C-alpha cells in the first residue's frame, strides 16, 4: 500500500494522525496548523493588546513549555508586541519541583525570557511536603491548587504584571467540567470554562491560550519541535479526585475523538445558565477559521499518565467529618467572628458566612472583593488560602473549602 499523503499540502508523506480529528498530516503542516489554531483562539478572544507585559506560568512540564514556545513564535510571526516573562512556582516538593525548575531555567535561557521564581515557603511559611505530612495524601491537591493560583497572582504583582497565561489544555478543562458536574457546582463550572478569568479591572487576570488544544497534540508538538520539558508526574497527584475524571474522559476519547471538545463546549453552554455570566467560549462561537479543507470525520472546533485512585474517599471523608465534630467544641474558630470598629462606644461583631460544599448552592455570579485577612482578591470575605492556612496552623486541616 502506498504511503498516505498529507491531507493539507498533498505532497509530503503523512507521519502524524491528529488525535483531535484523525486528520493525517506531515510534520510541517501539523506544526503550522497547531500554531494557527492557537493564534485563532488568541485573536478571536482578544486575549492580548500590543505592548502588554505577560507572565507565562512555567512549571517545566509539557504544557507550559509548549505554551512558552508557541507564544514566542506567534509573537514574532504576527507582531503581537508582547513582553513575555516566565513565572514559576516552587511548591516545595522534594524530588519533583526542584528538578523541574532546572528545566524552567534552561527554557528561560533558550527562549531569552526573564524568569521569576516564587515559593510556597516564602508566601505561606509552608511547603507541600510539610502540608502532606500534616494532612496525608488525601485532598492535598486542593491545598496545592488554591495556593498555586494565589501564588501566580502574587508573583505577577511582584513583577508589576496584570496578565498571567497558563498551560491549561482542552483535557484539563474537560476534566474540570466533569468534576464540577459531579459536585453540582454550577458557579465554579462557569469560572473553570472561561478562557479569561478576571478583566481589566482585576488586579491580575488569567487566560488559557491552549484551552482548545488536546493534550496528546501538545505532546506531539513538543516531540517534533524537540522541546525540553520535565515529564515526571507529581508524586502526590495519583490519588487526586481529578484522576477519576481523567480516566473517564480518556475512555470516552478512545470511542469518540471529539469527546474532549464536546465536553468543553457543553460546559460553556451550561455556564451560560449562571445569572449574569458572560460568554466563556472562543469569540468565534465554534466556527472554524479559514483553513485548507481536510476530509475527515469528527473535525473539532477551535483548536500524562492516566489518573488512578484506590477508592475509599467517601469513607475517609466521613470519618474526618465525625472527628471534626468531636473536636469542634475544644477550640474557637476565629473565622466565624471578626470584631468591627467601635460604633457609639460599643464593639459589634460581624458573623461571616461559612462556605460548605455540601450546602445549597446559590448559583449566582460571585463578586470579586478582598480578603479581610491578607488583602488578596477573593469572592469570599476570607479567601480560600487563608481558610486552609488557618486549619493547618491549628493542626485541624480542612477537607473541603
Image (tube, grey):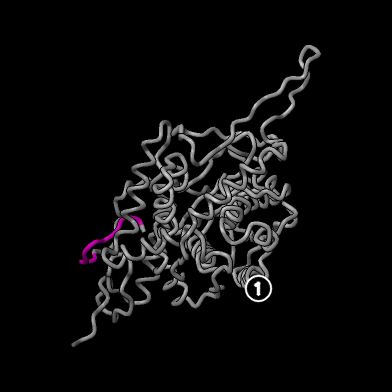
Residue at 68% across, 63% down: 129
Q: Is residue 160 visible?
A: no
Extreme bottom residue here?
A: 1
Residue 39 placement, left or right of 386: left
Q: Is residue 276 above or below residue 48?
A: above
Q: Position of residue 395 (x, y in %)?
A: 71, 50
Is 381 in front, or is 389? 389
Q: Quadrant of the C terminus?
A: top right
Q: Which residues are magenta?
A: 294-302
Is 141 part of what is drawn in magenta? no
The x and y percentages for residue 31 are: 40, 70
Residue drawn 70% across the image and 56% down it: 120
User: Residue 313 or 276: which is nearer the viewer?
Assistant: 313
* Front-lying residue, 320 or 55: 320
Q: Nearer the viewer, residue 232 or 336?
A: 336
Residue 328, compared with residue 109, is above or below; it is: above
Label 1 crowd bin: few (<14), some (14–19), many (20+), radius 10 Å: few
Quadrant of the image for the N terminus? bottom left
Against 191, residue 316 (above or below) is: below
Residue at image location 44% in from the left, 53% down from the top: 176
Q: Residue at label 1? A: 95
Which corner quadrant of the image does residue 298 belong to? Answer: bottom left
Is 299 included in the stretch rendered in magenta?
A: yes
Judge left or right: residue 230 versus residue 241. Answer: right
Residue 395 visible in rendering:
yes
Count of residue discs: 1
Amino acid at each position: 500500500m502506498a504511503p498516505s499523503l498529507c491531507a493539507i499540502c498533498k505532497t509530503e508523506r503523512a507521519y502524524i494522525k491528529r488525535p483531535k480529528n484523525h486528520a493525517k498530516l506531515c510534520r510541517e503542516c501539523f506544526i503550522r496548523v497547531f500554531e494557527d489554531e492557537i493564534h485563532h483562539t488568541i485573536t478571536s478572544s482578544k486575549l492580548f493588546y500590543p505592548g502588554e507585559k505577560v507572565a507565562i506560568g512555567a512549571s517545566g512540564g509539557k504544557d507550559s513549555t509548549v505554551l512558552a514556545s508557541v507564544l514566542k513564535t506567534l509573537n514574532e510571526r504576527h507582531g503581537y508586541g508582547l513582553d513575555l516573562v516566565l513565572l514559576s512556582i516552587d511548591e516545595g516538593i522534594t524530588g519533583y519541583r526542584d528538578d523541574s525548575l532546572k528545566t524552567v531555567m534552561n527554557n528561560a535561557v533558550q527562549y531569552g525570557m526573564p524568569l521569576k521564581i516564587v515559593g510556597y515557603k516564602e508566601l505561606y511559611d509552608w511547603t507541600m511536603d510539610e502540608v502532606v505530612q500534616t494532612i496525608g495524601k488525601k485532598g492535598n491537591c486542593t491545598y496545592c491548587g488554591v495556593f498555586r493560583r494565589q501564588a501566580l497572582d502574587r508573583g505577577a504583582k511582584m513583577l508589576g504584571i496584570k496578565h498571567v497565561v497558563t498551560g491549561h489544555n482542552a483535557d484539563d478543562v474537560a476534566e474540570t467540567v466533569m468534576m464540577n458536574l459531579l459536585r453540582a457546582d454550577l458557579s465554579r463550572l462557569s469560572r473553570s470554562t472561561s478562557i479569561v478569568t478576571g478583566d481589566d479591572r482585576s488586579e491580575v487576570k488569567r487566560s488559557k491560550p491552549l484551552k482548545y488544544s488536546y493534550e496528546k497534540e501538545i505532546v506531539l508538538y513538543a516531540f517534533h519541535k524537540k522541546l525540553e520539558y520535565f515529564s515526571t508526574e507529581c508524586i502526590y497527584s495519583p490519588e487526586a479526585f481529578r484522576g477519576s475524571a481523567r480516566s473517564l474522559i480518556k475512555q470516552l476519547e478512545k470511542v469518540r475523538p471529539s469527546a474532549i471538545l464536546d465536553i468543553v463546549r457543553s460546559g460553556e453552554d451550561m455556564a451560560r445558565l449562571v445569572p449574569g455570566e458572560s460568554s466563556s467560549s472562543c469569540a468565534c462561537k465554534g466556527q472554524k477559521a479559514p483553513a485548507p479543507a481536510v476530509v475527515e470525520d469528527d473535525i473539532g472546533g477551535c483548536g500524562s499518565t492516566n489518573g488512578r485512585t484506590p477508592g475509599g474517599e467517601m469513607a475517609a471523608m466521613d470519618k474526618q467529618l465525625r472527628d471534626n465534630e468531636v473536636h469542634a467544641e475544644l477550640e474557637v474558630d476565629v473565622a466565624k467572628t471578626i470584631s468591627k470598629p467601635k460604633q457609639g462606644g460599643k464593639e459589634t461583631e460581624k458573623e461571616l458566612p461559612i462556605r460548605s460544599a455540601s450546602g445549597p448552592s446559590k448559583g449566582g455570579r460571585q463578586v470579586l472583593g478582598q480578603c479581610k485577612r491578607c488583602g488578596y482578591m477573593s469572592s469570599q470575605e476570607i479567601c480560600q488560602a487563608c481558610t486552609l492556612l488557618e486549619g493547618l496552623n491549628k493542626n485541624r486541616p480542612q477537607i473541603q473549602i
